[in-house]
């Protein structure tokens, strides 16, 4: 069994939580609670990796991740 590490960005809007894994295109989820979104994105990442491995695709790991909250005046 291999262990992979990916970044996950979680955002909250008025009604739900949204989580995305930027390194895996199309890997995201949206549900009502923080706990659910964390569980769902972990499952989504696992399924995404399993699918790529089944298709003989390489799984690239990020070397570093930087998340910045930037304030922009308009």
Image (spheres, rainbow, N blue to C red):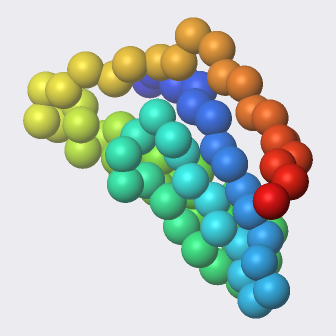
Describe residue 62's horizontal placement relative to residue 66 as left or right.
Answer: left
Describe residue 25's horizontal placement relative to residue 46 as left or right.
Answer: left
Q: Position of residue 8 (x, y in %)?
A: 65, 44
In the rendered image, the residue lying farthest to the left is 55
Which quadrant would residue 14 be assigned to in this image? Answer: bottom right
Is residue 42 positioned above or below 68 on the image?
A: below
Q: Position of residue 62 (x, y in %)?
A: 53, 18
Which quadrant would residue 57 be assigned to in this image? Answer: top left
In the rendered image, the residue lying farthest to the front is 74
Q: Position of residue 60 (x, y in %)?
A: 38, 19
The quadrant of the picture occupied by the N terminus is top left
In the rendered image, the residue lying farthest to the bottom is 15
**Which of 46/68 is in front?**
68
How many numbered discs? 0
> Could you tell me which residue is drawn at 35 percent across and 38 percent down?
49
The quadrant of the picture occupied by the C terminus is bottom right
Q: Is residue 39 visible?
A: no
Is residue 29 positioned above or below 7 on the image?
A: below
Is residue 38 positioned above or below 51 on the image?
A: below
Q: Is residue 54 visible?
A: yes
Describe residue 28's horizontal placement relative to residue 55 as left or right.
Answer: right
> Could you tell me which residue is drawn at 41 percent across and 40 percent down?
24
> Could you tell me which residue is drawn at 43 percent across and 53 percent down?
27
> Could you tell me which residue is drawn at 86 percent across and 54 percent down?
73
């Amino acid at each position: 069994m291999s262990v992979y590490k990916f970044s996950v960005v979680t955002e909250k809007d008025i009604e739900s939580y949204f989580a995305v894994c930027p390194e895996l295109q199309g890997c995201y989820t949206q549900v009502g609670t923080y706990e659910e979104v964390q569980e769902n994105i972990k499952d989504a990442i696992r399924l995404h990796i399993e699918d790529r491995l089944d298709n003989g695709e390489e799984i690239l790991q990020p070397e570093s991740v930087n998340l910045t909250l930037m304030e922009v005046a308009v």
